[in-house]
Image (tube, rainbow, N blue to C red):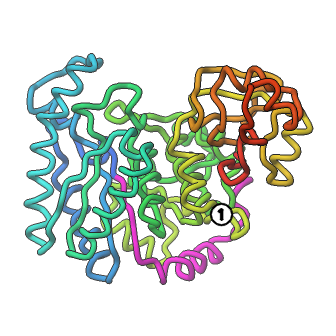
Amino acid sequence: MPDTITADEGRKLRLAHLKDVKRVVVKVGSAVLTGEVGLHHETMENLADELAFLRDSGREVILVSSGAVAVGRRKLCIIQPILSLKEKQAVAAVGQCGLMHYYDSLFAKRNLYVSQILLTHSDLAHRGRYLNIRNTMSTLFDWGVLPIVNENDTVSAEELQFGDNDTLGALVTNLIDADIFICLTDVDSLYTGNPATDAAAQPIHTVSTITDDVVQMAGNSGSSLGTGGMRSKILAARMVAARGGYSFIGPGRRQGVIRALFNGELVGTFFLPHEEQQKLHSRKHWIAYVLRPKGFLVLDEGACRAVRRQGSSLLPSGILEVRGDFAAGDPVHCLDRQGKPVAAGLVNYAKAEVEQIRGLQSSEIAAVLGYQGDSEVIHRDNLVKL
């Protein structure tokens, strides 16, 4: 049972941990923002009030918003359930205009300026662009502007996609070192079971550690208007926890839901960060969670143990098998014999070279490759335990 914290303890935890929060990322999904006839105006008015509350309380805020495709569908009267990539991109281009126009007018009434930032996965996977985005957002904060972030559906091919805005929201949270990731959805909270089919299912209001059991408990409850189910939200919360941040999943159409959270009310599910010694630094978090692996290295038991327990570099002697196609400097994932992820890292050699030196001692590398390269296939500074 992940929630062994009493209701009174849960309230005290929220008040204690959230009183010093200064930077907030709020993600809201299509299922919350849209209804049968387009944008759900009452919900969006409430969302604007909630973000204005955060700003008026001295906090910096970023909004990660879905909804462009759903708005475009309704504007163009497109009812077919499945769109091709080019159709989705065109619909998003239409919907993004309407969505941002409405946000601009909403926040103008509350004396807030907004900006639009459209991202693809490659923008974050490139370290230079990753840092440029961070600097742009910091400048917008300095100017008192509220950034609104969305995936750039219009140009995003499959290999450039985040998969869902839950992942995007978590990556933005860690990118700007936000204190909390607030995910507003059409589900009240995480439950012990599916409340639609299990009458005994109970809400879980506090999660101290996001274990695999918690992820499995989330199931997969995607909405017809969105791409992310509860499982993707839990995985996003785990990404944020790895960097030392809090997360919250709660009902996006409940009036005053963010104020209720900061007042300590037991609404939604509140996730605590990892312990201090488990927190990942920014660059290692980027390696582990932003970069997508170009290949995989299967390790023997000794190498797995050295990486997991000792934080050692990966030497060629511990590599059993090489998969995929990668160049020197590319991201790869390390697996155990059963295929379970052990670590992620930036490899010092191309695939063909790793194939030649796997299983060998570091002292044998020069004789095999014909030059003296690194003694490690992945140096520990570029290696992150998963």
In this image, 380 relative to 86: left or right? right
> Magenta span has 248?
no
Against 350, residue 148 (above or below) is below
Q: Secondary structure at mark 1?
A: loop
| Residue 308, position as x, y percentages in the image | 81, 48
Q: Residue at x 21, y 56 (%)?
A: 44
Residue 172, percent from left and from top: 41, 55
Residue 205 visible at all: no
- Is 356 situated left or right of 216 in this image? right
Q: Amino acid at mark 1?
A: Lys
Asked whether 197 or 317 is in front, the reply is: 317
Q: In front here: 150 or 301? A: 301
Q: Which residues are magenta?
A: 1-27
Label 1, on which residue? 279
Magenta highlight on residue 10: yes
Indicate the quadrant containing the C terminus: top left, top right, bottom left or bottom right. Answer: top right
